[in-house]
């Protein structure tokens, strides 16, 4: 009975992946205009990253764009590092409360441009990052910008790059299908008017994590148009450098999924969790050869979701990652139950 259930779960998982693999991006219609926009950057203890980001932004900022930095009660010298960069285009505010959502809302309330872009303080921009903006679909209500995580340095960075490339793949493919499932607030754009119409962050403001996912869900509920834009690897983020911070981050990501307002988003979470649990159980339920054959329904589609350059650069680590990933999912699931979740040294409301 349990073996049959595991097989059914893996078949459903395989079918879902095949649907994504068959989805193709819409054709670009050439260069378009760039509307006036305000970049909102919430930060807490980001003194090492934020000066470099501000230099890149200010050097290549489109005309009439503005930057609003929102200090979420930093305890380091972030404010001192920001002061030399303040001007008519760039201002800094103190958050009206604690947490990223309140910091974002503080900045959005002071923005008066048609478009808002939320950006994390640790984002790294290339010198020509603005060139990709001309191909974005600014006629939509929300734009999910792609992010690039390089596979470099230690093992922890390589495995994060592999996992993140799968996340980016699902983000793009589900958006192309018209039912976006994943999002990333490190670089997210939306119309200010649409943000107000969907109620902003109010419905889940008590949950400290998930500002991007919840907002995307609200946009979908109101039939707002959401598009995915490939920044052509011009926007980069680094992974977590320590296992503790990585586990904390993944716990935050996983914990918020149960509160997603849309049925299909919850369904995807349950199918993914079930498939990983089935992958752990299968070797104990059937013979080795049969188990490997069944698990190929999970490993093969995931393999082709990983960026080709990463598969080529880290062939052995890629295979090890796919085989052991269910154990990682189990660790995160157990961690949510046992350990408190923190962000930037503060405990999160786990609702």
Image: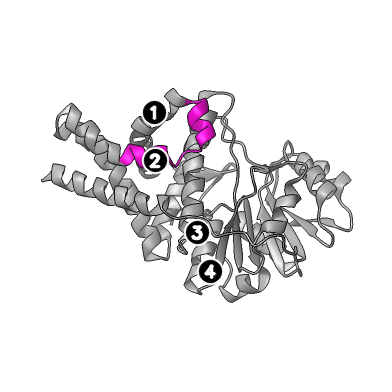
The x, y position of residue 199, in whole percent, is 57, 73
Name the residue rendered at 68%, 43% in the picture. Answer: 234
Question: Is residue 303 highlighted in magenta?
Answer: yes
Name the residue rendered at 15%, 29% in the picture. Answer: 287
From this viewpoint, is residue 265 visible? yes
SS for dot 2: helix
Image mark for residue 319: 1
SS for dot 4: helix
Please tell me which of labels 4 and 1 falls first in the chain: 4
28 or 82, which is in the foreground?
A: 28
SS for dot 1: helix
The x, y position of residue 313, in whole percent, is 52, 26
From this viewpoint, is residue 79 visible? no
Q: Which residue is mark 3?
A: 175
Name the residue rendered at 53%, 69% in the picture. Answer: 219
Pointer 3 with pointer 1, Cβ within 8 A: no
Left-right relation of 296 to 283: right
Question: Is residue 57 highlighted in magenta?
Answer: no
Cα distance between the residues tagged 4 and 1:
37 Å
Cα distance between the residues tagged 3 and 2:
18 Å
Q: Which residue is mark 2?
A: 302
Mark 2 vs mark 4, foreground winner is 2
Range shown magenta: 298-314
- Please, is residue 284 above or below residue 37 in the view? above
Image mark for residue 219: 4
């Amino acid at each position: 009975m349990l073996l049959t259930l595991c097989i059914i779960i893996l078949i459903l998982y395989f079918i879902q992946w095949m649907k994504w693999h068959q989805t193709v991006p819409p054709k670009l219609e050439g260069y378009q205009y760039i509307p006036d926009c305000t970049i909102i950057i919430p930060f807490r203890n980001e003194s090492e990253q934020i000066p470099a980001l501000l230099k890149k932004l200010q050097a290549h900022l489109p005309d009439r764009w503005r930057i609003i930095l929102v200090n979420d009660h930093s305890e380091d010298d972030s404010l001192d590092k920001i002061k030399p960069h303040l001007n008519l285009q760039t201002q800094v505010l103190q958050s009206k409360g604690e947490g990223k959502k309140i910091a974002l809302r503080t900045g959005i309330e002071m923005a008066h441009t048609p478009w808002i872009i939320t950006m994390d303080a640790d984002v790294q921009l290339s010198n020509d990052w603005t060139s990709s903006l001309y191909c974005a679909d600014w006629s939509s209500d929300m734009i999910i910008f792609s992010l690039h995580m390089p596979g470099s340095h230690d093992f922890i960075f390589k495995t994060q790059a592999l996992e993140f490339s799968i996340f980016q793949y699902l983000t793009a493919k589900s958006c192309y299908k018209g039912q976006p499932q994943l999002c990333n607030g490190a670089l997210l754009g939306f119309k200010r008017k649409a943000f107000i119409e969907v109620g902003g962050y109010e419905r889940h403001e008590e949950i400290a994590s998930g500002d991007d996912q919840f907002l995307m869900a609200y946009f979908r509920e109101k039939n707002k148009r959401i598009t995915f834009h490939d920044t052509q690897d011009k926007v980069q983020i680094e992974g977590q450098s320590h296992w503790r911070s990585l586990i904390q981050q993944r716990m935050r990501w996983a914990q918020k999924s149960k509160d997603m307002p849309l049925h299909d988003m919850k369904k995807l979470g349950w199918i993914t969790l079930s498939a990983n649990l089935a992958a752990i159980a299968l070797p104990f339920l059937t013979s080795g050869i049969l188990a490997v054959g069944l698990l190929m329904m999970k490993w093969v589609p995931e393999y082709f979701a990983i960026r080709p350059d990463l598969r080529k650069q880290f062939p052995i680590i890629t295979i090890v990652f796919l085989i052991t990933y269910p154990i990682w999912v189990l660790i995160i699931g157990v961690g949510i139950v046992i350990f408190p979740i923190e962000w930037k040294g503060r405990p999160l409301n786990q609702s």
